[in-house]
Image: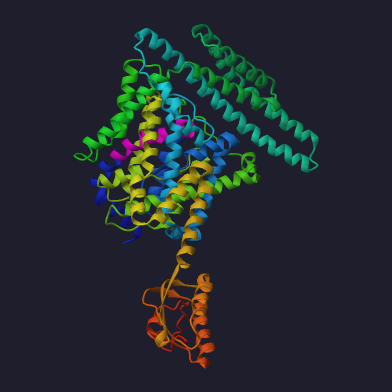
Amino acid sequence: MTPKSQLSQRLGATWKQDLPAALIVFLVALPLSMAVAVAAGVPVSAGLTAGIVGGLVVSLLGGAPLVVSGPSVALTVLVYQAWQQHGIESLGVLVIVCGMLQILFSLFRLGVWYRAVSPAVLQGLMAGIGLLIFASQFHVMVDDRPKDSGIANLVTIPEAVAKGFPPPTLETAEQRAAVRNAMDRLSGLHQRQNELLEEVHHLLAGEELAAAEDDDSENDEDEATVRAMLLAASLQDLAPRQKQIVDELATLRGDVGSTAIPAALTGAQKALADLEAGDVAAARASQDRAESLLIAARDTTKHHRWAATIGILTITLIIGWQSLVVPRMPYLPGVILAVAAMTAAATVWQLPLDFVELPTRLFGETFFPNRGEFAKLANPALLLLAVEFALVASAESLLCATRIDRRHSGPRSDFNRELLGQGIANVCCGLLRALPVAGSLVKSSANARAGAQSRLAGIAHAAFLAVFVAAALQWLHLVPISALAAVMVYTGFRLIDHRAAIRLWRENRQDAAIFIATAASVFVVGLLPGLLIGIGCSLGRLVWEFSRLEIARTSEPELGRYTLTLRGNATFLRLPFLADALAEVPRDAELRLNVEALDVIDRACLDLLHDWQRENEPYGGHLALNQDSLAARFWRRPRRRQPDENGSAKPKRERQVPI
């Protein structure tokens, strides 16, 4: 029987367990994919696409059958920073390079090295990421914009609380409907303006590379002129769409008395003029300006108190469900029920909230990255960011695989194959301009609890997600942003594993210190520097452990007898201290060495003892010790045994320690 037929037989035998589990995972994945996109500041369609692609590709090709992948929670902060600093057009190439690096990690079989990283470092990494998500999404939960840094987000949480309290007043239904209608129209205009902005950035990125190549060569000027004319014509083709935005903004200005709408109209008119003129030099700046002014206009219509109320109720429902219902019915996900309940409430009472922005079609505005966008990788900062993407996404996926392995008795995860599946999925996501994917602990835990038996559950969940998005994409426009942000606030808090921190504090204070240092560094200086600081602390602790040596001396001068008791590790790092202890022993004394509490002794310390005996023997000095006990603690690299003529390894003769 071929491996393919064996796989088909296994899938066919477990479909009764896998399909119900897939349905439950789909109910978890739908709101979570949207919430991660909101947290990353990208269109919700990018999160849904990542959920479909990650669930399908990684479940088919990955090395952890019960792990379900989707948009990376750990990378939300990095994605937000990436498009803020390098432009939205950088996201596709960043995710592609991230996937290619993960494929290289797999080919070089680096997956097993994940186990070499201290658990305190990995838990600290996740805790720092969780704190970043919690602090930033707390502001989004009250329909506010997050700040520029994690510290600023954390410090200004009281300001966000003040915006959300006291509870909102109950305006008339007509007043709430009027405000909501204005917010819906502004959100729709912003979505269309953002799609235009992405397309303009995409076109101009390719032109920048072509212009740079012209500067470095002696191409015909006529060819450059023709290309510039074609680009101007492409920009002019976008002008009708911009004209529609201008016309709707002009109508909206008379309906909504917001002072920011005239400024947004002026910005949209400038963007229209640049597109109609085919102005390559000014089109990008005017599009950026028009999009930011539309955001400012939309922000003036927000009702922070209603948003805070919806967010708090969402978290309350999730926590209540986890506490009261999950112990009896662990398969029912509370996240989808909480988001659905808040969506229904916002729809019935026409609450003035910020809602999800969606394109008409999921892949309607998809275009592959061009050469100009790939050329941006010449920027070292962007390339370093791609490496950071790959390291964090890999750590998140392998940590998820490790934890899920503890929850089932099936085959263990193949880390290198899992990295290969994640890498291929990220390359696909980059081509579709979707979010980067990684193993999702939330979805994978739901999958394991629901009784999934094979990778069919992950594949089917992606199919369910794709069918729902294709059939009911516009219904998702009714979901409040504050409810999705509340899901991320809850998720970020759960990533801060306080139980693990307490356990580390009780068991090993050094590991607890590494956990705190890693989490604090990730929060303050960034993910990659924080990870490196955590690894550095872990290595520092290892050096300290190997350098720890306690030397206790007892003496019987009347008998000329001295005893040194060694505890810990006698390595070259503590050689001076051992030398000082030996120097205090008289030359004609009998020195007894107690090594029962010694963990290891290296060649340097062994030679020091040998030198003491050789130098003091003429004066009557004598070193007494248990030769076998010391030999058992001697640290030497084992030699490879040579096979004999029959192919079996020759027994290795034990060597005495030369004392």
**Vertical side of 417 occupied by 290: above or below:** above
- Image point 33% across, 42% down: which residue? 460
Judge whether residue 149 is colored magenta: no
**Vertical side of 417 occupied by 307: above or below:** above
Instruction: State whether the magenta stretch is mostly helix, strand or loop.
Output: helix
In this figure, which colouring scheme has been used for the structure? rainbow
Quadrant of residue 39 within the rendered picture = top left
Q: Is residue 324 toward the left or the right of residue 422 in the image?
A: left
Residue 402 at what x, y percent from top left?
Answer: 36, 54
| The residue positioned farthest toward the front in the image shown | 558
Q: Is residue 474 toward the left or the right of residue 572 in the image?
A: left
Q: Is residue 72 visible?
A: no
Image quarter hosting the N terminus? bottom left
Residue 358 at what x, y percent from top left?
Answer: 45, 26
Q: Is residue 282 toward the left or the right of residue 221 in the image?
A: left
Frontmost residue, 238 versus 5: 238
Frontmost residue, 596 versus 166: 596
Magenta residues (range): 23-45
**In the rendered picture of this protein, how many numbered marks are placed on residues?**
0
**Vertical side of 523 occupied by 200: above or below:** above
| The residue positioned farthest toward the left in the image shown | 328
Judge whether residue 41 is colored magenta: yes
Q: Is residue 530 visible?
A: yes
Residue 238 at what x, y percent from top left?
Answer: 60, 23
